[in-house]
Image: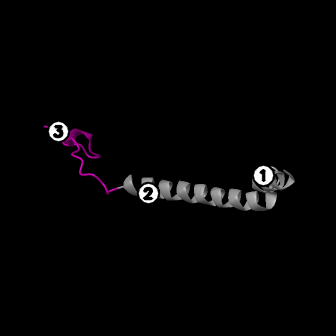
């Protein structure tokens, strides 16, 4: 019974901070890396593709041309 309790305490996050802190650290690193890679991918897919070719009416130019 005592051995079972010790084994249970070794696996419990509240009793064994040495193993659990390492596990939580790796989970945190994985989440941060996933967030950064996802953000970089989203920025890459929504990037600026250059200046569009927009047709500007002649009457709105700096020196307008009237009919």
Q: Nearer the viewer, residue 2 or 66?
A: 2
Tell me: 43 left or right of 24.
Answer: left
Determine the residue positioned at 38% across, 54% down.
Answer: 45
Mark found first going from the N terminus, 2 or 1: 1
Local SS, label 1: helix
Tell me: 34 left or right of 22.
Answer: left
Counting from the top left corner in percent of width and height, residue 18 is at 79, 62
Is the magenta region chiefly helix, strand or loop?
A: loop
Q: Give neighbour class at mark 3: few <14, some 14-19, many 20+ (Cα, 10 Å).
A: few
Determine the residue positioned at 65% across, 56% down.
Answer: 28
Determine the residue positioned at 26% across, 44% down.
Answer: 61
Counting from the top left corner in percent of width and height, residue 54 is at 24, 47
Q: Nearer the viewer, residue 54 or 33?
A: 33
Q: Nearer the viewer, residue 15 or 34?
A: 15
Residue of label 3: 66
Q: Nearer the viewer, residue 40 or 21?
A: 21
Residues rendered magenta in the picture: 49-67
Tell me: 45 left or right of 5.
Answer: left
| Label placed on residue 38 | none
Q: Give neighbour class at mark 1: few <14, some 14-19, many 20+ (Cα, 10 Å).
A: few
Mark in front: 2 vs 1: 1
Local SS, label 3: loop
Mark found first going from the N terminus, 3 or 1: 1
Residue of label 1: 8
Determine the residue positioned at 80% across, 57% down.
Answer: 17
Mark in front: 3 vs 2: 2
Disc 2 and disc 1: Cα gap in Å?
42 Å
Mark found first going from the N terminus, 3 or 2: 2
In reply to whether residue 61 is colored magenta, the answer given is yes
Q: Are marks 3 and 1 in contact (CB under 8 Å)?
A: no
Q: Give neighbour class at mark 2: few <14, some 14-19, many 20+ (Cα, 10 Å).
A: few
Residue of label 2: 41
């Amino acid at each position: 019974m005592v051995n079972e309790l010790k084994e249970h305490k070794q696996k419990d996050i509240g009793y064994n901070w040495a193993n659990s802190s390492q596990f939580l650290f790796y989970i945190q690193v994985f989440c941060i890396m996933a967030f950064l890679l996802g953000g970089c991918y989203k920025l890459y897919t929504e990037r600026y593709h250059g200046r569009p070719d927009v047709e500007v009416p002649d009457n709105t130019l700096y020196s307008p041309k009237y009919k």
